[in-house]
Amino acid sequence: MNPNGTISEILSHKGNTVWSISPDATVFEAIQIMADKNVGALLVTENDKLVGIISERDYTRKVVIKGKASRTTAVREILSSHVIHVSPSSTVEECLRLMTDHHFRHLPVLDGDRIAGIVSIGDLVNWIISAQHTTISQLQTYITGVPA
C-alpha cells in the first residue's frame, strides 16, 4: 500500500457509492439523508451532472446562523456551486493539499463529466495510516527477518 496512492485505489477499497440530492429539494431533506447515511456532505446533481455540494457546514453557516427554515429553504439557495474536484488518478497528497488549502472535508471525484465517487478527509487519513502501518511491518520484517 503506497502512502501516496491514487484516489482510484481508495475508491476501490471504500467503494464508489455517492449520495446526492436535487437542487430543488429542501435543506431538511438533505440533512435527513446525511443523517440516515451517516455522511457529512451530499453532491448536488441535476440530470446526473454535478452542480454543487452541500455539507453540514453549509447548513450551519447558511441556514441555522441566518435564521432560515430548513423545511422551506431549497438546497440550491445554500449549495456551494464552485466545486473543486479531482480525478481518479489524483494522488492522496494532492487531495490533502487541496482540502487543506481550501478548508473543506469532502472532495468529489470526476472521471470526465461522470461522477466516480467522493472522498473525505477521513478516507485520506485512514489510507495514510494503513500505508504507514504496512511500511512499518515490512521494515520490521526486513530488519528482524521475522514477520510482524
Image (cartoon, rainbow, N blue to C red):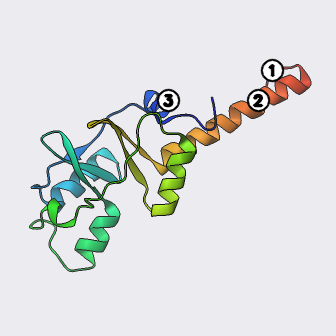
* Location of mark 1 (residue): 147
Q: Quadrant of residue 126?
A: top right
Reading the image, the residue beneath label 3 is: 9
Which image quadrant: the N terminus?
A: top right
Residue drawn where x is 52% and y is 59% of the image? 100
Please state the horizontal and vertical placement of residue 116, each as a whole percent of the image. Answer: 33, 34
Q: Residues within 10 Å of mark 1 (few under 14, many from 20)?
A: few
Q: Nearer the viewer, mark 1 or mark 3?
A: 3
Q: Are marks 2 and 1 in contact (CB under 8 Å)?
A: yes
Q: Which mark is residue 51?
A: none
Question: The residue under label 3 is which amino acid type?
Answer: Glu
Q: Is residue 65 above or below residue 95?
A: below
Quadrant into which the C terminus falls: top right
Q: In the shown orientation, is residue 17 left or right of residue 93?
A: left
* Amino acid tagged 2: Ser
**Mark 2 surroundings within 10 Å by alpha-carbon count, few (fewer than 14), some (14 through 19), many (20 or more):** some
Q: Position of residue 16 (x, y in %)?
A: 35, 33
Say whether disc 3 or disc 2 marks the residue closer to the N-terminus.
3
Q: Residue at x 40, y 38 (%)?
A: 87
Say what secondary structure mark 3 lies in.
Answer: helix
Spot occupied by residue 42 in the image (x, y as percentages of width and height): 28, 50
Question: Label 3: few (<14), some or many (≥20) within 10 Å?
Answer: some
Residue farthest toward the right in the current orientation of the protein: 144
Query: Residue placed at 53% from the left, 47% from the top?
Result: 94
Spatial CA span between label 3 and label 2: 20 Å
Q: Of the residues shown, which amino acid type is indicated by label 1? A: Pro
Give the label on residue 137, or none: 2
**First reached walking from the N terminus: tag 1 or tag 3:** 3
In the image, is residue 44 above or below residue 112?
below
